[in-house]
Amino acid sequence: MNQESGNGDSQQLSITDQLTSEYNTVFKNKDLIEPDTIVDEDRIVGRDEQLNKVINIIKPALHGDQPEDMLLRGPSGTGKTLIAGTVATKAINIGETRDIEMEFVEINGKHKKSEHEAVHQITHEFERALDLRYTSKTGVSTSSRYDRLFEIVDDHLDFGIVILDELDLLVGDNRNKDKAPAFSDILYKLSRAKRIGKMDSAFTLIVTTNSPNNLMNGLNSRTDSTFNPTEVSFADYNAEELREILEHRQDAFYEEALDTEVIPYVAAIAAQGEGDARFAIDLLREAGNIANRREETIVTTEHVEQAKNQVEKNYVVDIIENVSVQKQVSLFAAAIVNQYGQQQLKQSDLFTEQSVPAPVAHTLYNWITEHKDIEQRSKHSFLRWMRELDTYEVIELNRKGRGNERGVFAEYIFHNLSAEVMVETLADKDDRLADILEEEDMIKPVVRNNLKSF
Ligand SMILES: Nc1ncnc2c1ncn2[C@@H]1O[C@H](COP(=O)(O)OP(=O)(O)OP(=O)(O)O)[C@@H](O)[C@H]1O
Ligand SMILES: [Mg+2]
């Protein structure tokens, strides 16, 4: 047990001594840089235009009028959820002082599988916020969940705000191509209830999305004519803005614990990527965690450098866990070619141990879908999904020529996250893919023969 007994008379502290010994941390108030903290107004940097718009839209609620619905659009980490949450919270506080019964709830489309689950969650969040008896999700129809929601708004509220975060991700059962996505149904039912005056009370929808086109194109025509939100756009941050956002949170750390170069460095890295404030804050926090783990008292750019790989990895894992099943299967096929074909890839002149040829990945996609009874889509779709995964930076797509007349083909490169980790992550999500790993003896020769004959 004693790791340091090499020098003879070691002085191993007792467990109690170790647990109660001095605790060093670089963080004074870590909450300020935790992922879901809604910070105070004075820590919001810029975004005046967006704040003003959202405030003006919500304001009528404090005067007994019905606000418009809103669509907050823009890339990841640009402050959509923050602005929606801050304004909603303030409005509710003001409502309280004026005897207006207000409440807001927030659900994230990413974490919901169906319309039923989403509307249940909204209802449940209202029940919780208002201290009402919880009603059950199972054994009741979706329409009775809506009825319960409208009843709550009507009986207990003057005004409700429903934030539907990342709503475009709530697609529901996307195996049926003819069916509208779940978000279309939910928007239709919620906005229609308002229009036909199902309740005496009012509520407003604040929808946020990274891909407004996917969202608006996914609405069917009846939803399209009932849901007419006012749009508010959010753009990426530049390095200067990110630096300011981070500076407004530097009291998350003890005064001397942050090397002066750290914040500009984190801001520069985040601006080079996507201009995503969440990434910048995550990077700063992880750098602090690394310093703590090493029992160092000052966070330096070297810690940031270390943290970068970890944070990037977590982002990729988060993306692949949330893309559609077909994209997951496509990615799994490519990753398994890389994993089982390591030796051949290493020896090849055309590829590296990090890459795979697209045609072989596609052959494996066909093999997997056939063997696991997963719907098989066209080669064209497969290639399109992989291109999308390239734009999400999950993989990198590269075009290669073989010289002579053998043409140009694509290769997929795994450099942000190894194929091995991808295979593992995807198998954890889907039993059918996990099964394939059990059948290693069957699939390995398929990979190797296809690589050989490529
Ligand atoms: N202008 C800002 N001032 C201070 N902090 C900000 C600002 N913009 C974003 N942040 C912080 O950055 C993080 C990400 O912001 P937020 O969650 O609002 O992004 P988002 O636009 O909703 O992203 P996504 O589309 O991925 O949901 C949060 O911790 C938020 O507090
Ligand atoms: Mg958000």
Image (spheres, grey):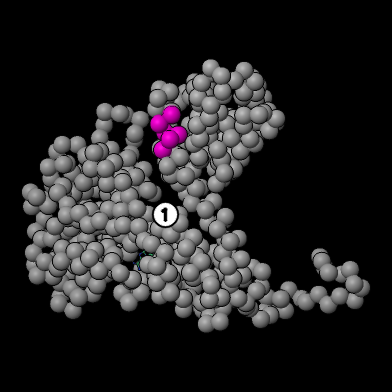
Name the amino acid, label 1: Glu
Q: Position of residue 222 (x, y in %)?
A: 14, 38
Look at the image and tell me whether residue 127 can be seen: no
Write the residue at 31% across / 29% down.
176
Write the residue at 53% across / 72% down.
261
Q: Position of residue 46 (x, y in %)?
A: 30, 69
Write the residue at 52% across / 82% down.
255
In this rendering, is residue 11 above or below 426? below
Q: Residue furthest front?
A: 404
Tell me which image quadrant ligand 1 sits in: bottom left
Write the residue at 18% across / 73% down.
95
Would you identify the image quadrant in which residue 447 lies?
top right
Please check the rendered image and state whether residue 80 is part of the magenta-colored stretch, yes or no: no
Q: Secondary structure at mark 1?
A: loop
Magenta span of residues: 383-388
Q: Position of residue 446 (x, y in %)?
A: 61, 21
Judging by the rendered image, the residue that carries numbered circle 1 is: 274
Would you identify the image quadrant in which residue 175 lies?
top left
Q: Position of residue 73 (x, y in %)?
A: 27, 53
Please indicate whether residue 46 sits to the left or right of residue 27 in the image: left
Q: Nearer the viewer, residue 174 or 237?
A: 237
